[in-house]
Every structure is written in structure tokens, then in C-alpha cells.
Image: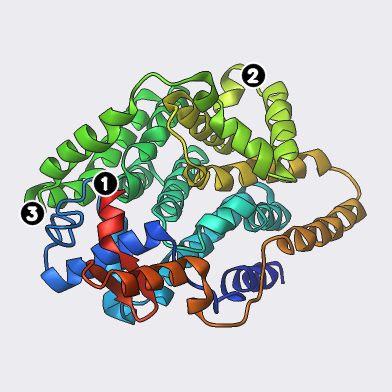
Amino acid sequence: MALGLLLFLWGLIYWAQVGDTAPGVDAMTYGALAKHVLSSGDWATLHYSSQAYSDFYQHPPGAIWLSALGFRLWGASDLTLRILPSLCALLTGGIIYRWARIQGGAWMGFCASLILLTSTRFVKYTQTFMLDPFLALFLTWAGFELFEWLNGRGGAVRRGGVLGLSLATALLMKGVPALILVPVVLILLWGQGRRESIRFMLSLAIGGGVILLPWFFWLEGASYLSRYWSESVVGRATPRSAESLLAPSRNLLKQYWPWLVLWLWASVRWLRRNRGRDALAPAGIPFLLSWGILGGFSIAGSFLEHYLVPFYPFAALAIASEFSESLRGRAREVRWVVGVSTVVAAVLVLGMFVRVRRGGLEQSPFRQALMQSAREFPSAKILRISSTATELWSGLAAG
């Protein structure tokens, strides 16, 4: 029943407004690059033409490749651009549910998934094609594999190999932010036996190599990473103001309601209950990763709202973990009362951003402006991703 309700909520959130699937500029950019991958057959270097993004090194190509495969399966359209990130959200929620169920039972699994599905900024940026939903999915999967190994569920070779696969895939999705998992792995290995830790890390390296080595040898991955590092990463590593360093925290303060208060409560409660080696327990992984993601973007000083998409699954797990722990040993009726209250609150939160619209895509003001510009400047280069997605590439390339 719990899974059925969660699936219903996912369908309501992601497909109730399917009549308004106009992608934003980022989604149209990635969609155009993916479409050209299919039309040109060039999977090594992302580009559209010599006039616009002749060479695209802003991010690694993993998500673009998946989009190209989606276009091959379902056709190049705005709807296809919506399918892939919504599936990422569904799979991320499924991993969160299983993780929480193993840790604290079905009740905790339901709470964690429900919190995730009612995190408004997670939903917003997984409803359209961005790179962050893909990063969140594979980081969550990698974290789950680490949790399973530390819990003794699967050997070091198996779990380390799968973690390497998922971590390398996360790196292919959005580059440097995927590496936040590495220090967490090293911290947690400190409490494990030396032999098992070595086997785990060797398996992790082999699993990562299965993904990255073919890219390096056959698709110019080393050259791509070099250009990505010099053009997209190094340029952002500059001195920042105090305001930019606090931007991620300010964003959560504005947008992560009502869950921000509970995440802070859960973090304080967990720190009080776990000291010394107890802090290296598997249950601490969601806390370490949510703190690490928030702290990483704060230290980097380079921040946009959608960067925090990977934060929300781990924050949901952290909240559900402490919430479940606080109710342990109490009357069962308390859980039902709190559960019903949570569902009611969730429905109210959903009402803030679930909109069922009627009418065509051409009613979008942004789309109408592009169409008007196309009529006024017929010589401008126009790219059609689908019959309903139009972008003025001359303006995009100049910007």
C-alpha cells in the first residue's frame, strides 16, 4: 500500500502537468546536443555546429549520451526530455525507500520517500532535463552500496565494484560534484579492517575503470576531461565573497520548507547520539553526504539553485532516520497519528507546486518571444529540437 501511494504521488507530481512540458534553456541546450549526437554519429565531442557550441566541454557527456539514446528510443521531442529526469526521480526514490526500509523498516522507507517527493526544489529540477537528476541518482546508488557493505550485506569485492561503477557514472553525469563521495568513503573505511578496506578500494577502482577506461581509449575521454577541467572547473575556483559562500544555506532557508527544520533537528540529534567511532556507523552516511554536499558548494562559492538536487535524497534519509528512531519503542498508534498527519501535510505541500494546466505549449511567454524573434529576424539560425521546442542559437551562443 505504501509503495502504491508513493507511485501515485510520483505520477501526480511528474505527469499531472504533462500539457505544459516546455523545456527551459538548459534543457533545450542539452537536447540539441543530444540530437546532434544521433545525427552526426559523433559521440566523442559534443557540438551542434560551427556557429553554436562547436565544442562543448562545460560538463562531461554522460547525461547527453543518455538523452541521445532516449531520442533514439522515443523520438526527439520535449516529452522525451521530460521522461528521463522523471525516471531518475523515480529510481532515486526507489533506492531511498529500499535503503530506509533496510535500516528502519517499511515505516522509515515510506517517510524518506515521501519527504523526498515533497521537497519542492528536488521536484522542480527533476521535472525537466537537467544534469543534476542524473547525478543525484548515481550518487544515491553509490551511497546505498557503501551502506550495504558496511552493514555486512555483500562482500567487499561485490559492493566495492558496484560502488565504483555508480561513482564513475556519476562523474560522467556532472563531473567534479560526484567526488563528494570519495572523502566519505575514506572516513568510513577508517573504522574497518585493513584487508577488507584494501579489497574494497581495489574493487572500487576496477568498477570505476569499467566505465571510464572505454571512454578514455575510444571516445577521447582524457582530452575531454582536460578541456572540462581547464574551461569549466578552474575558472570557477576564484576568490568569492561572503555572500556567495552563504548562498547554498540561504537557498535552503528560503526553499526547503517544512523539512529544513527537521533536517537541522535530525543532524543535531544524531551528533548528540553518536560520538567517536559510533559516528562511523552506516546510519551516518546520509548525514555525512548531506553535510558534504552543502558544505562543498559553500566552500566552492559557485552556486545555482539546482546544484542542491543531490542533497535532497540524503537529507530525506537523515530526517526519516531520526524521526523513526525517536518513535522507537513507543505505542504503535503514535506512528499512525504522525503518519496521517505527515500525509496531510505532504498533500498541502504538493498543492503549492502541482499545477494542472490546459492549453498548448505555444502559450508560454518565453516560447512566444522566441517565435516573434524568429519572424522579425528570419536570417538568424534557428534550431528545432522538436515540433514544439524552438531556440534562437545566435542569441544563446552570444550569451
Task: Name the residue rendered at 43%, 76% in the picture.
Answer: 79
**In the image: residue 66, left or right of residue 231:** right
> Is 324 in front, or is 345?
345
Residue 241 in view in this figure? yes
Q: Residues within 10 Å of mark 1 (few under 14, many from 20)?
A: many
In the picture of the structure, the residue carrying the numbered disc 2 is: 275
Residue 153 in view in this figure? no
In the picture of the structure, the residue carrying the numbered disc 1 is: 207
Judged from the image, the secondary structure of the residue bearing numbered disc 2 is loop
Three-letter amino acid code of the residue under disc 1: Gly
Q: Do the residues under discs 2 and 1 have CB atoms within 8 angstroms?
A: no
Residue 21 is marked as none
Comes first in the chain, label 3 or label 2 = 3
Comes first in the chain, label 2 or label 1 = 1
Q: Do the residues under discs 3 and 2 have CB atoms within 8 angstroms?
A: no
Marks 3 and 2, how far apart in space?
A: 48 Å
Judged from the image, the secondary structure of the residue bearing numbered disc 1 is helix
Task: Name the residue rendered at 57%, 69% in the picture.
Answer: 14
In the picture of the structure, the residue carrying the numbered disc 3 is: 218
